[in-house]
Amino acid sequence: MNFLWVFPVLVVLVLAHEFGHFLTAKWAGVKVLEFGVGYPPRVFALRRGETEYSLNLLPLGGFVRLLGEEDPGDPRSLAARPAPIRLLILAAGALMNALLPFVLFTAAYAVPHEVTSGQVVVAAVAPDSPAAQAGIPTGATIVRVNDRVIHRQDQALSLIHQHLGDEITLVLRLDRFTQIERRVVPRWAPPVGEGPIGIQIALQNPVTTVETLPIWEAAPEAFRTTRDVFILFKNEITSWFFGGSGPKAAGPIGIAQVTGEVAQQGLAPLLNFTALLSVNLAFLNILPIPMLDGGRMAFVLLEIIRRGRRISPVWESRVHTAGFVVLLALVLLISYEDVTRILRKETLFP
């Protein structure tokens, strides 16, 4: 039943997103008709001022209803606001999803969590790879990548992937008395199975401890982790244009499966996973996809380019409707793949 954790995860992600729209709309004087938790059918609602706050039956997130999202007839409608204000309101959801990981990573570091560390060793070097050309020997221990001391495999892999196309310096220990430096440039599109620099790594003499960081230590660590994750996402997307492997897609069923697998590992891993989903949601929502915030932002940008001449609301509505149909078809297709993968007893990330 661990897959049921997907519901509170989705509620956190979507409510944070919608809260961004809510706050900026209130600030800009746009009338907020409803802020809903969950999706209809409605359980109950209460009104505070001009806004109705509702609790709904389906625990899949939440929503905000703004007055006149496409009709500028009312002076307090969203469509009646100046274009820069509308862009801010539309972008605020993605911005909140970009800020949420810092909070989640801070919480993950502040609760008791297991940390496995040891000596990160070069287990294999691929022939003709950047590592082989740089003279990185098999069996060497990775002491530092640039200025970061390495105690875990994920540290080394993260730092290498953060510097795709840029030279990095590896400090390697050969024995108790000998250290060497090697400079190498991680590749954007390495051969399958080789990795950016062409090494396989292993953890020797692993020691697992339980850590709980105080908030004044957890917050700076969370800031660094959030920064690193955004760099990794940027590099991953950039690598697609250099011939790297394409994105892995998962629908609601696949996300529920992975959420259940992560939830079995404890609270801290679940918080970390939710933070990664939030970054995904932030990136997805700024893409110019019809029906999503990025698609609506694209119409506002077209209006600015056309010096204030708007695309007909009828045509905009048609584009978003067509986008919704395409997205729904994609979700159904991906969900079918998710189900077949589960039936084969496979995970999304083997």
Image (cartoon, rainbow, N blue to C red):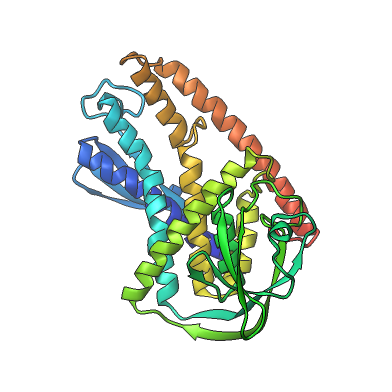
The N terminus lies in which quarter of the figure? Answer: bottom right
Residue 90 coordinates in the image, percent (x, y): 36, 36
- Residue 262 appears left or right of 147: right
Can you say whether 38 is above or below 213 in the image?
above
Can you say whether 52 is above or below 141 in the image?
above
**Residue 165 seen by the camera:** yes
The C terminus lies in which quarter of the figure? Answer: bottom right
Residue 213 coordinates in the image, percent (x, y): 39, 79
Residue found at x 40% / y 18%: 313
Q: Based on the displayed image, in which of its 4 quarters is residue 116 positioned?
A: bottom right
Residue placed most toward the observer, 308 or 140 = 140
Residue found at x 61% / y 56%: 255
Residue placed most toward the observer, 238 or 247 = 238
Residue placed most toward the observer, 48 or 232 = 232
Residue found at x 70% / y 60%: 131
Residue placed most toward the observer, 237 or 248 = 237
Q: Based on the displayed image, in which of its 4 quarters is residue 83 positioned?
A: top left
Residue 252 coordinates in the image, percent (x, y): 60, 51
Residue found at x 31% / y 37%: 88
Q: How many marks?
A: 0
**Residue 43 seen by the camera:** no
Residue 167 coordinates in the image, percent (x, y): 56, 53
